[in-house]
Image: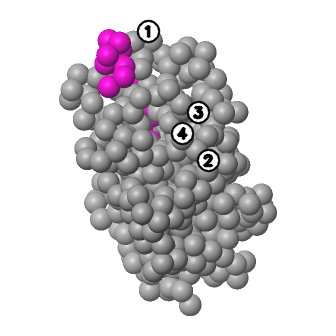
Amino acid sequence: MQIYADNAATTKMSRTAVEAMLPYMEEIYGNPSSLHSVGQKANEALADARKRMAACLGCEAREIIFTSGGSEADNHAITSAARLGEKQGKKHIISTAFEHHAVLHTLKRLEKEGFEITLLDVHEDGLVTAKQVSDAIRPDTCLVTVMYANNEIGTIQPIEEIGAVCREKGVLFHTDAVQAAGHLHIDVQAQNIDMLSLSAHKFHGPKGIGALYAKRGIRLTNLIEGGAQEQGRRAGTENIPAIMGMAAALEEACAHIDENAARVSALRDRLIAGLSEIPHGVLNGDAVRRLPGNVNFCFEGIEGESLLLLLDDKGVCASSGSACTSGSLDPSHVLLAIGRPHEIAHGSLRLTLSEETTAEEVDYMIRAVSDVVEYLRSMSPVWRDLTDGRRSFVTK
Ligand SMILES: *Cc1c(COP(=O)(O)O)cnc(C)c1O
């Protein structure tokens, strides 16, 4: 038995996406900047993919630029807004404490350059409010960047309301929608979004490709100098096969978004109910306002790493949080941001489901996690201290 429950880290490519790529490796392999017919065929495909991506997001084709993935799109959006702000003497940026590192590290770099960064506190339920954003906006604020849905705990932020606040105050609004795209309805106009990042490998497309939506009129800074591709905003020959795979994957995901969300969230709730039976565990993030496939628990008295290794032995591929931080012994910045104490933040488990997950797999995971948690606790000195009363429980 092998169960893949790490879909927030990456997803398996869909057949549709794979098949959409093949012709652009073997037949239509031209460079879209070439003037001859092989190049022009590639160029037509590129324009078509851009149009189809735009249709899924509710924007215009020319507002989409292709990037190497979510990280690049985040870097590009935030750096561009900072450069625009700088010109007007505005060097204050608002974000949240639980963003992806692609956002947090870009902000760190800007801070070293003299920008002032306000990271909003995240409530225990994993949410920030539009009121918090509104209260933090100052006359010198040039950007608000708040993620659409969190990659570790899956909570979905009130994007439309935050966008409305930013629009009213004339501040650019960027959202890292890498976990949301293809899984939740996105309409950049209705939701007042100025810039949005997405990444194909999070919705069954290929790795190494993503997109940045930037509202018409926003001047993007060049991160990569070179040719005039992407309207002079991102140099380098376009990765046509990956772009075609991404467009096909996004279209497919968006065409089935409601039925997928209904199916996957029913399985998520079954998994949450099953894991809630384990004593001294706690669900991280709001139970309702969360991504259809995201389940994230902390279990007291155990180490997340050992839990993951033993689950892997039982055929369950899980994660302790973000793939980027696993391997480090620091507890997740996301769990600390929602106020989980260090001692329980270490015992975290993220299981992220996909459209292919079955009810049998969910039931298997409930048994596997329960068994492994019980086994690890039976050997844990911390657990013994807790049960002997030498230490007190943080959870119920
Ligand atoms: C995966 C992820 C990214 C990074 O995307 P890549 O395409 O892997 O660079 C950024 N933000 C969030 C929220 C993510 O989940």
User: Which element carries disc 4, helix, strand or loop?
Assistant: helix
Residue 343 visible at all:
no
Q: Residue at x 41, y 37 (%)?
A: 77
**Mark sitting earlier along the chain (1/2):** 2
Number of residues whose C-alpha sits closer than 10 Å to that of mark 2, classed few (under 14), some (14–19) or many (20 or more): many
Question: Circle 4 is placed at which residue position?
Answer: 63
Task: Find the distance from the CA under tag 1 to the CA under tag 4.
Answer: 27 Å
Question: Circle 2 is placed at which residue position?
Answer: 54
346 vs 388, nearest the viewer: 346
- State yes or no: residue 270 in magenta: no
**Mark sitting earlier along the chain (2/3):** 2
Q: Position of residue 395 (x, y in %)?
A: 54, 52
Q: Position of residue 202 (x, y in %)?
A: 52, 61
Task: Find the distance from the CA under tag 2 to the CA under tag 3.
Answer: 14 Å
Q: Residue at x 70, y 82 (%)?
A: 360
Q: Quadrant of the N terminus?
A: bottom right
The amino acid type of the residue labelled 4 equals: Glu
Residue 68 found in image quarter: bottom left
Question: Circle 1 is placed at which residue position?
Answer: 139
Report the span colored magenta: 83-98
Labels 1 & 2 near each other (Cβ < 8 A): no
Q: Position of residue 30 (x, y in %)?
A: 41, 68
360 vs 113, nearest the viewer: 113
Task: Find the distance from the CA under tag 4 to the CA under tag 2.
Answer: 8 Å
Q: Confirm or reject: label 1 Cβ below 8 Å from ligand 1.
A: no
Question: Which of labels 2 and 3 is toward the front?
Answer: 2
Task: Find the distance from the CA under tag 1 to the CA under tag 2.
Answer: 32 Å
